[in-house]
Amino acid sequence: MWAYVIRKLVYNIPVYLGIILLTMAALRVRDPVAGYLGKNATQSQIDRLTEDMGLDDPFIVQYGRFLWQIVRFDFSEESWAQPGRSVRSILIDSIPPSMSITLPQVAASAMIAMVIALISAYFRGRLVDRVLVFLAVLGMSISYLVYIVFGQFFGAFLPQHLDLKVQPFAIQGYLPWLTEPRNWLTYCLLPVMIGVIVALGFDTRFYRAVMVEESSRDYIVTATAKGASKPKIMFVHMLKNAMIPIITRIMATLPFLITGSILLEVYFNIPGMGRQLITALVANDFPVIQAFVSVLALLFILSIILTDVLYALVDPRVRLS
Amino acid sequence: MTNRPDTRSRGLQPPEQEVGRGGGFQPRDGRPKAVLEVRRLTTRFRTDDGVVTAVDDVSFDVLAGETLGIVGESGCGKTVTSKSIMRLLPEHIASYGEHSEVRFDGVNILRADSRQMRRIRGDKIAMIFQEPMTSLNPVFTVGWQIDEALRYHTNLSRRERRERTIEMLRLVEIPNPERRIGQYPHQLSGGMRQRVMIAMALCCEPDVLIADEPTTALDVTIQAQILDLMSSLKEKLGTAIMLITHNLGVVAQVCDRVLVMYAGRVIEQGCVREIFHAPQHPYTQALLESIPKHGARRSRTHKLPTIRGIVPSLRHLPAGCRFNDRCTYCQQRCIDEEPELIERGLPRPVRCHFPLNQALASADHAKGER
Amino acid sequence: MIGRFLGSRGWRRFRRGRLAMASLAVIGVYFVAAVAVTLGAVSREDTKMRVGPNRLPGFLERINAEKRYDFNKWYVGELSGVFGRAQRAGDEAAAREMLGAFALAERRMSGAAPSELFPVYETMEKAWGELDDALAMREDLADERFVLRAEAAEQRASGADASATEARLREVEERLSEIRPRVEELYREVERAIEVLLPMPEGLRGLVYRLRIGLGTDSKGASISSQAVYSVKIAFQVGFVTALLAVLIGTILGASAAFFGGWVDHVVLWVVSTLSSIPYLVLMAVFVYVFQAPSLAKWFDNPDRPGLGLVPLYAAFGLTFWIGTCRVIRGEVMKIKELEYVQAATALGFGRFSILLRHIIPNTAHIMFINFSLLFIGAIKSEVILTFLGLGVKGQPSWGIMISHGADGVTNFFFWEVGAATVFMFVLVLAFNIVSDALQDAFDPKHV
């Protein structure tokens, strides 16, 4: 088991080194200092900032230094656009908000999509199935942004405007759940719901495809020939096999959701990782961009490794040794 | 099977009826009862390019305790026939002819509801498949999968089922069955998996076992073992076997009677010995000739005969006799009209205008009748 | 290759799907619109030009009292500005010129002599003044009625004498009922005057103008329908260029990785797994950030050639999207490479490049088409997201810009801007979705 994990880790190290290399190179294609300070900067300002970031060193030295920073998780340099805050504190502060809208989103969308996909696969080829599939395609054809705009309008704005008694959702904003759990809920519920609805179209189609593929396997015929009922076949034989690709997919979407909720975070003013990254990109906040992309990629790779391990646990065919 | 006592608590005792006859099919002592009657079976598939008739007006009986072989090239409808009997074809694509009937125990399987079907499948009629690699569910243990069939069809307790599972595995000659029941299919070899499949199919002591090319995917040595195993289990349990194969050698080795199929139709049927000795249909004859003979003289001039041409596509069947474009004896009549499967004036039913070996066949048949 | 693709069995099966063919026709209509826009049917000026008051609703929506007041006020304001300037100009010819210069697209100032128009303008001003007074009075009366009603109810409840209050209330209600038709009459007068001064154009020009305001106007009074149609061109530009770019890169790299193997395969796989380890939105954002560098901006940020402004977007999308295509093509070529006819071609001594070009790549055509269609959708949808985040299209209308601008309007119950962009985009994306599904079904029936 541990040997398997370590092998996976070792295998992914060159990939991660490559990501850092590409990120750093890409971010240096345009002069970050000049981009941040604009045209009116004096030479001395430029020189100072360049020297502070060590951008005048040879690339390989910068590469090594940054890698060493990642290893120690030492992002102590100051953000350019938010003076007085270190990159590290921005990073750490933005993780809980992101998580509080990402994790419920993954869990809820996976469950609901799985149920719909099962219904769809059960009635495969019949009217119910065709309607569900078509609804999924319809849902996929609408822009994420439109869901958000109208979701906010109908979910939060309209109840407030009409002065309804029940106003379960806040229009925008965020409060930490540790200190104010109830408000936290009103702030997070609407973005989470919108995220789930957006994800449903694609997820349902994927899960349905997985289940339909599983339902055409030989072992399903064997089970039928054994005298198993259709629900037994679907929920026992098929579902356990379908769980393998489904778990893989859920794990693989995790890191995407961290950024997939960029839009939600920006629109609902939730100070998560996605919003910080976009703010930094727009404001040319070079140290924050560099650190965020590296950390996001690291999270991504770790979740890939986790997926592989989980995969091995679910599927008896994958040997762990 | 009203005359059969309940299997559920009976253990491994073969049913009395079969015990009396010693299990195996013996055509000479009277006509044994047919357990499965297939009448005018027609199976059609809806495809993107229109409706295709994969099995066309096929009728035959499976007699108690016999081994019936169904032979033919790939795509001749053997597998579809067997899956139609079990109703295993996807219902939204496959449909059956209006007059088609598969009678089992007074029930027409083709019109049975899902509850009746569940009671028949696995308990009364069981099936084993060509691909032992994919036919077992990869995420459940072997023991669980055999146990599943027992759970559906018997009232045994968990411990009894476990014992029975181990017993079955021992019966199909799997060494160390106590350890094997905890293993997953991928941990077994192909031959082992096919043995597991057989154990699974036979654990409820079905009346009919349908074996769809059970040895095709296996090594030659394993093939022989599996066939021997099936024969001996048939003797022990008195189960009738419907063996689907393209391998005439296998037929000669284990079958009592044979059904030869071509392009969705039965073209000849009869006892193995008769068919091998005096084939009446040119296709049967050609099939027999294309078997490499053991110890045959090998020379430059002597080539193994083959059947020229290929099996016609079910979408573009030739007019008249379906075999006419490949038949060496083809005449104008064969192109003009399709022959019926007739017994009239012939020793065995054959679908040909100009049957071969008539004298020989009649003699054989007469000998058999005596 | 396209010929072979069109002759294939999968294509014939695809053509049998009625829904898919209808979707293809829809895409064709959009394509024609995009070509028409490129040829100048709707110019960039058209999308910026003021065609009416701000946030004018589109067809079929009734204008409520509040909006009626706002829109009339806007017209009166604009007209009084023009007429004021014309009055100050002094002589008749200058005034005529000044008045003639005022236009809302096809809706121009009436061609009559200024001496005829001025009286109309003056009556309009007067009526508007009276209307304002009448409305103010109505509001006062309504307030008073509210107070009196409450008072009367209170007096009745306490048993005091309420007759004086009730008499006053009756008087107020009478005056209110008198004022209502007066307000309506004044509105009519103002609207008539506006119609005389700014007559609705007739014939073809009238039709064009009605089309322009058919879906309403945005927060700057510009035509929403023009913007939505112009955005079709942007969508096709972004979709077509990036999908083509991505499919080309993906096919070339994927096919050569699978076909040549060895170090080529290693390098391609390394790049693919590295790039796919960065979430794609981040990757795209970073690419846009890089390509919007000041040193590159002097090429792309050319106000005379706004099309160049899309280059960073093309590059970012193209460089991100090829990864998926590359993976699929690599897998497929791996399979094809082992097929007998390729082995036969190798055995017959054909060159490796000719095998790759003549035997392998044409057989991946369906995958390329499916991917093209999927990436087209991806590009259109990503454009909206990036534009909202401030990293996408700038300086010309696009559905993304319309949705992000119109989002403010939604909280004011003005749905036309977001709605128009959504519907235009939805139909196109839906058509592409159906086509890609049908392609997949037709060419790869096993893949469900």
Image (cartoon, grey):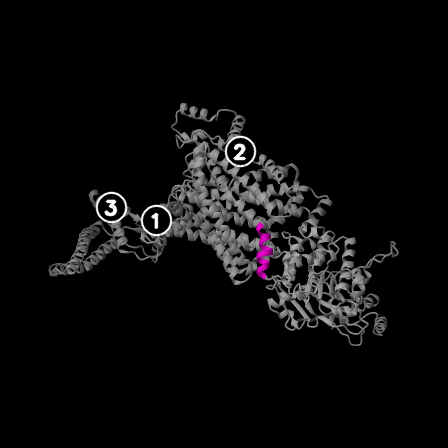
Quarter of the figure with residue B98: bottom right
Res C413 visible: no
Please state which amino acid type lies under the numbered disc 3. Val
Task: State the image coordinates of residue A219 (x, y, percent, origin top left).
Answer: 64, 56
x and y percentages locating residue C240 in the rendered image: 50, 46
| Residue type at tag 1 | Gly
Both on one chain, marks 1 and 3?
Answer: yes
Q: Nearer the viewer, residue C71 or C288?
A: C288
Other-residue count near label 1 (Cα within 10 Å), few / some / many at <14 / 14–19 / ≥20: some
Q: B101 left or right of A173?
A: right
Give the residue type that dot 2 points to.
Answer: Ile
Q: Secondary structure at mark 3?
A: helix
Foreground label between 1 and 3: 1
Q: Marks 3 and 2, how far apart in space?
A: 62 Å
Same subunit under labels 3 and 2?
A: no
> Which quarter of the figure is the C terminus of chain B placed in?
bottom right
Image height of B356 relative to A132, above or below: below
Q: Residues within 10 Å of mark 3 (few under 14, many from 20)?
A: some
Closer to the camera: disc 1 or disc 2?
2
Q: Indicate which disc residue A20 carries.
A: 2
Q: State the SS at label 1.
A: helix
Span shown in magenta: A230-243
In the displayed structure image, the side of residue B276 where residue C360 appears, left or right: left
Gap between marks 1 and 2, in whole Å? 42 Å
Q: In the rendered image, is residue C142 in sight? A: yes
Give the number of the disc on residue C409.
1
Q: Residue at x 52, y 63 (%)?
A: A127
Q: Give the farthest residue toward the top.
A: A44
In the rendered image, which residue does mark 3 sit on? C82
Inspect the magenta stretch and tell me whether residue C180 lies in it: no
Check disc 2 and report its element: helix, strand or loop: helix
Tag 2 subunit? A
